[in-house]
């Protein structure tokens, strides 16, 4: 007897768990999803919403982060990299807004830039030069352990005693 089942090769094959929605989040998305403004250069996360089949990205791109390169009425052009063999390819796909959310990957960097600008302005007013580079933590401080002679216990193996009886 040969194989009784056909291996699926469809567009959504192998997405039983990936495209399943969590408990109490099933159904269509709320209005807030549609009211988000996207601009070119924004970082976005592609998170496929299986309740809307239009403009659904291929399953490989689910969970990927990319940069917006084009904004249309209902969709966004997102550019990201894909590793194929030993090289990185730049992939450009168009995805509907329902399947995209703003990414927080760049948030800490932008916050740091704003803080550094404030520090530079303050230093300029005071007439000082300031270094905004982050300095690595480096190795921990040296510690010396001291103990009295009574507290020190030498652990040595007991001598082997041949016992014939």
Image (cartoon, rainbow, N blue to C red):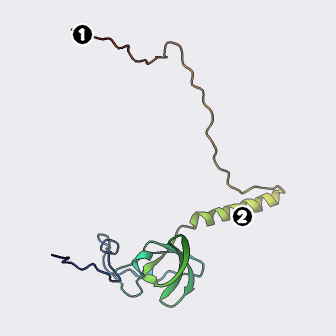
The structure residue drawn at horizontal position 49% and vertical position 17%, both measured from the top left corner, is: 152
Quarter of the image containing the N terminus? bottom left
**Does residue 76 appear left or right of residue 125 in this picture?**
left
Q: Residue furthest right?
A: 127
Q: Residue 34, relative to residue 149: is it above or below?
A: below
Q: Residue furthest front?
A: 1
The structure residue drawn at horizontal position 46% and vertical position 83%, both measured from the top left corner, is: 97
- The image quadrant of residue 54 is bottom left
Q: Earlier in the sequence, mark 2 or mark 1?
A: 2
- Secondary element under disc 2, as helix, strand or loop, is helix
The structure residue drawn at horizontal position 42% and vertical position 86%, both measured from the top left corner, is: 55
> How would you rate the neighbour count of disc 2 (Cα within 10 Å): few for under 14, some for 14-19, many for 20 or more?
few
Residue 43: x %, y % from top left? 55, 74
Residue 59: x %, y % from top left? 39, 77
Q: Do the residues bearing badges 2 and 1 touch, measured as CB atoms within 8 Å?
A: no
Say which of marks 2 and 1 sits in front.
1
The circle drawn on residue 164 is: 1
Residue 109: x %, y % from top left? 61, 64
- The image quadrant of residue 57 is bottom left
Q: Nearer the viewer, residue 149 or 106?
A: 149
> How would you rate the neighbour count of disc 1 (Cα within 10 Å): few for under 14, some for 14-19, many for 20 or more?
few
**Does residue 64 appear left or right of residue 138 in this picture?**
left
Q: Residue furthest left?
A: 1
**Does residue 116 appear left or right of residue 161 in this picture?**
right
The structure residue drawn at horizontal position 81% and vertical position 60%, both measured from the top left corner, is: 125
Look at mark 2 in the image and give the residue it sits on.
117
The circle drawn on residue 33 is: none
Q: Nearer the viewer, residue 157 or 147?
A: 157
Q: Could you tell me how many numbered marks the image carries? A: 2
Q: Residue 31, relative to residue 149: is it above or below?
A: below
Residue 50: x %, y % from top left? 35, 80
């Amino acid at each position: 007897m040969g194989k009784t089942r056909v291996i699926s090769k469809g567009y959504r094959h192998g997405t039983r768990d990936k495209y399943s929605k969590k408990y109490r989040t099933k159904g269509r998305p709320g209005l807030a999803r549609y009211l988000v403004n996207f601009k070119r250069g924004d970082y976005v996360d592609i998170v496929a919403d299986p309740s809307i089949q239009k403009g659904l990205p291929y399953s490989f791109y689910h969970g990927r982060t990319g940069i917006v390169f084009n904004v249309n009425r209902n969709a966004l052009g997102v550019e990201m990299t894909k590793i194929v063999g030993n090289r990185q390819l730049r992939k450009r796909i168009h995805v509907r807004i329902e399947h995209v959310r703003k990414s927080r990957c760049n948030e800490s960097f932008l916050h740091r830039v704003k803080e550094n600008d404030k520090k530079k302005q303050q230093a300029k007013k005071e007439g000082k030069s300031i270094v905004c580079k982050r300095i690595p933590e480096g190795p921990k401080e040296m510690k010396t352990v001291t103990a009295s002679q009574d507290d020190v216990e030498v652990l040595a193996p007991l001598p082997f005693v041949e016992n014939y009886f």
